[in-house]
Image (tube, rainbow, N blue to C red):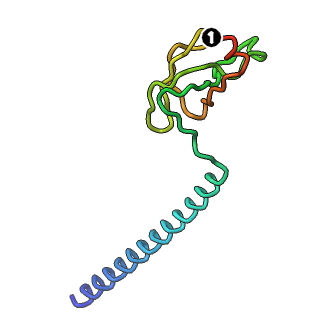
Amino acid sequence: MMKRTQNKVVEEEIRKEFSESREELRKNCKEQLFKVQEINRKGYNLRRKKARVYQEGHLAAIKRTQFGTGLKINRKFLGPYKVVKVKNCDRYDLVKVGNHEGPLKTSTRAEYIKPWVQNETESEADS
């Protein structure tokens, strides 16, 4: 009887030590994982720049995303488009201004938009 209780006590002690060592190992692994993730995050964000912020009413050009035959010599950007709504995560709703190629309404990310710069020849033609 005494031997059985001693075995149970020893067995319980072994389980406890195993559980503690496992928890310590998990803790160390978690710390190492966070360190590696932080290093990767810093490396990834090193050469990234913040997206340009557009306000409602700004004029912008959108990048042509559909390609096909004969588009090699066409413009890479379509526009002008007017920013109608600013959404979260650098997304915008745009509406076509004027009579030119492209969709009437579109929703796009800031990485596919650039500010609309009006040329002197275009402004003289409008007058």
Give the x, y percent position of residue 11. Answer: 33, 81
Left or right: where does residue 71 sit relative to residue 61? right
Which image quadrant for residue 24? bottom left
Instruction: Pick out the residue farthest to the right.
Output: 73
Left or right: where does residue 10 sit relative to residue 75? left
Give the x, y percent position of residue 115. Answer: 62, 30
Q: Which of 106 and 86 is in front in this view?
A: 86
Q: Name the residue under label 1.
A: 100
Q: In this view, does 38 lie above or below 106?
A: below
**Which residue is drawn at the image coordinates 43% and 77% (left, top)?**
21
Q: Quadrant of the C terminus?
A: top right
Which image quadrant for residue 8? bottom left
Q: In this view, does 48 lie above or below 40?
A: above
Circle 1 packing at 10 Å, graded few (<14), some (14-19), many (20+), is few
Q: Which amino acid does label 1 sit on?
A: His
Q: In which quarter of the image is the N terminus?
A: bottom left
**Which residue is drawn at the image coordinates 58% and 56% (left, top)?**
41
Q: Which of 30 and 105 is in front in this view?
A: 105
Left or right: where does residue 23 sit relative to residue 34? left
**Which residue is drawn at the image coordinates 65% and 54% (left, top)?**
46
Q: Nearer the viewer, residue 33 or 96?
A: 96
Give the x, y percent position of residue 7. Answer: 30, 84
Number of labels in the image equals 1
Q: Is residue 53 above or below residue 44?
A: above
Instruction: Pick out the residue farthest to the bottom.
Output: 2
- The kind of secondary structure element at disc 1 is loop
Left or right: where does residue 89 sit relative to residue 125? left
